[in-house]
Amino acid sequence: MPSPVVLQTSLPGLSVRRGKVRDVYDLGQQLLLVSSDRLSAFDWVLPTGIPDKGRVLTQISAFWFERLGEPNHLVTTDIRQMNLPAGIDLPTLEGRTTLCRKTLVVPIECVVRGYLSGSGWAEYRTNGTVCGVRLPAGLTESSRLPEPIFTPATKAESGHDENITFEQMVEAVGHEVSEELRRRSIDIFQRGAAYALERGIIIADTKFEFGQVEGKILLIDEVLTPDSSRFWPADQYAPGHGQPSFDKQFVRDWLTASGWDKNSPPPALPDEVVVKTRAKYVAAYEQLTGRKFA
């Protein structure tokens, strides 16, 4: 039975900054990240939420933080260990809340691509490159790349992130930081993708975020989730066209087919789309972790 949809939270006595899908509470040296069930598409937050979406994404990230062993910002996802103000509705926060260290966020989306899809496919068709990286001729949509490539992007508060070259990244954050983030991003992607493939999931591409604290660079935000990555079922993979997925592409396809102009407030999602989208998120969690989603 799906949980009630949580579109927004409000914690007494705590100021909040709302992103597209998360509510962020500042606790001084720490942050409280609450993943809502809001869904964004085409740079709009949709009026209809997806039940349990926030819980799925929070628990997938927690799974990866533990499994990867990468230095990261996670303190706990156990609300009983968060010392929250009295009177808070704990059941609403259960499973969707992350207590983490506050960091100075590196203003770069660290994108790693293992397959040719999305904006990378669009650029490749035009000039044979992705973010300035020259690729072999003759690749088709969804082709596996000879090796993963690092294609950074600027972080946008609103609207689309903008792809940049590695040289532009160096100009923005320096050579040493850029080299470390490229190396670590590719390494994390390769380890995560190898494990996911054992579980029958292709991670086609993903984006990571990093932050700095006390001279160290930590992996932050969410990690290898269906919202930050393209998840494809391995048993259905066939290059040459778009792939079925575990992510919100199902919603994007419905919105496109609905006739919505993408410039005005989006329509509400029908119940059928909501149910199928929730099922995709839950299936991704269960297949990836081997655990039953509770």
Image (spheres, rainbow, N blue to C red):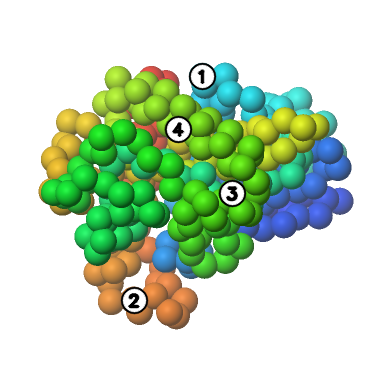
User: Badge 1 is on which residue?
Assistant: 67
User: Is 223 situated left or right of 195 in this image?
Assistant: right
Q: Secondary structure at mark 3?
A: helix
Q: How crowded is the residue under tag 2: few (<14 C-alpha within 10 Å), some, or many (20+)?
A: few
Report the residue at 48% width, 57% height from top.
Answer: 164
Using the rendered view, name the quadrant where residue 279 is placed.
Answer: top left
Q: Front-most of 255 and 217?
A: 217
User: Badge 3 is on which residue?
Assistant: 170
Compute the Cα span from label 1 to label 2.
Answer: 41 Å
Q: Earlier in the sequence, mark 3 or mark 4?
A: 3
Q: How crowded is the residue under tag 4: few (<14 C-alpha within 10 Å), some, or many (20+)?
A: many
User: Is 278 situated left or right of 76 in this image?
Assistant: left
Pointers 3 and 4 in contact (C-beta within 8 Å): no
Compute the Cα span from label 2 to label 3.
Answer: 39 Å
Judged by depth in the image, the label closer to the viewer, 4 or 1, is: 4
Q: Secondary structure at mark 2?
A: loop
Q: Is residue 292 visible?
A: no
Report the residue at 74% width, 44% height from top.
Answer: 104
User: Which mark, residue 227?
Assistant: none
Report the residue at 43% width, 79% height from top.
Answer: 263
User: Is 75 situated left or right of 282 in this image?
Assistant: right
Pointers 1 and 2 in contact (C-beta within 8 Å): no
Judged by depth in the image, the label closer to the viewer, 2 or 3, is: 3
Residue type at tag 1: Arg
